[in-house]
Image (tube, grey):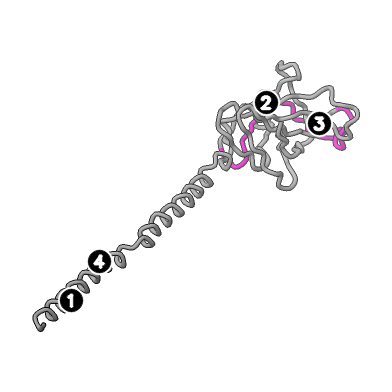
Amino acid sequence: MTVSVSALLAGLGLTACGSSSTAGPPKAGGAAPVSAAPIAGQSAAPAMAMASTGSGDPQAAHCRTQNLRWTLTLLTDASTSTKDPANAELVAADPGSDSCTLAGYPKLEFHVGKGPQALGVGKGSPAPVTLGAGKKAVIALHYSELNGKGPDSGNCVSVTASSADVAAPGDSTEARVPVVDQNGKPAEITICGDEVRLSPPVAR
């Protein structure tokens, strides 16, 4: 009897040890910790991707002078229904495949050698215009002419030029743009005074 009880107790001890050894690993390597790590990693990856996409947005890049195609057109048949018709218009077109933003007024200067000059002047801060492939920004130009239409047309120093120096907003590089008429032929602009008023750029 004594021997069978001892054997029974020994068997129970082995059973208890066996149950404790099989219970240990699930506590150390349970399902919850293993699944938590991949979720944390997956949630961090999209956040980094979004930040990268935002900082690399091509529309955030400022337009460069040399990357645009400029046109300066003298207008001779402005609509009579317009209260203040433009005398000319400056167009900046994006011929490439990348987008850029025209943020502000472009630089515009008319020079007659080392003599008189007329500079483009804009009021306020115009809304940025995003140019994509094939898109353009149009800036209307207003100035006094030697024809009695302007406030200074009776007494002014005139500037007659066949081209102008232009630059994209914030860009120090200039481009020489010839003046053309509405048929695309060479023309001249005669400005009475030293100022050309720039309207805010409009996308077309």
10 Å crowding of disc 2: few (<14), some (14-19), many (20+)? some
**For the residues marked 1 and 3, what is the alpha-carbon distance in whole angstroms?**
103 Å
Residue at screen point 64% across, 42% down: 103
Q: Residue 176 carries which label?
A: none
Residue 172, horizontal then vertical, whole percent: 56, 39
| Amino acid marked by disc 2 | Thr
Do the residues bearing badges 4 and 1 touch, measured as CB atoms within 8 Å?
no
The residue identified by callout 4 is 22
Q: Quadrant of residue 17?
A: bottom left
For discs 2 and 1, the disc positioned in front in the rendered view: 1
The residue under label 2 is: 71
Mark positioned earlier in the residue sequence (2 or 3):
2
| Magenta residue span | 147-172
The x and y percentages for residue 197 are 77, 38
Residue at x 61%, y 35% (from the top left corner):
167
- What count of labels does the image hold? 4
Q: Does the magenta stretch include residue 150?
A: yes
Q: Please, what is the dominant secondary structure of the magenta stretch?
A: loop
What kind of element bears circle 1? helix
Q: What element carries label 2?
A: strand
Left/right of residue 86 with respect to residue 60 in the rendered view: right
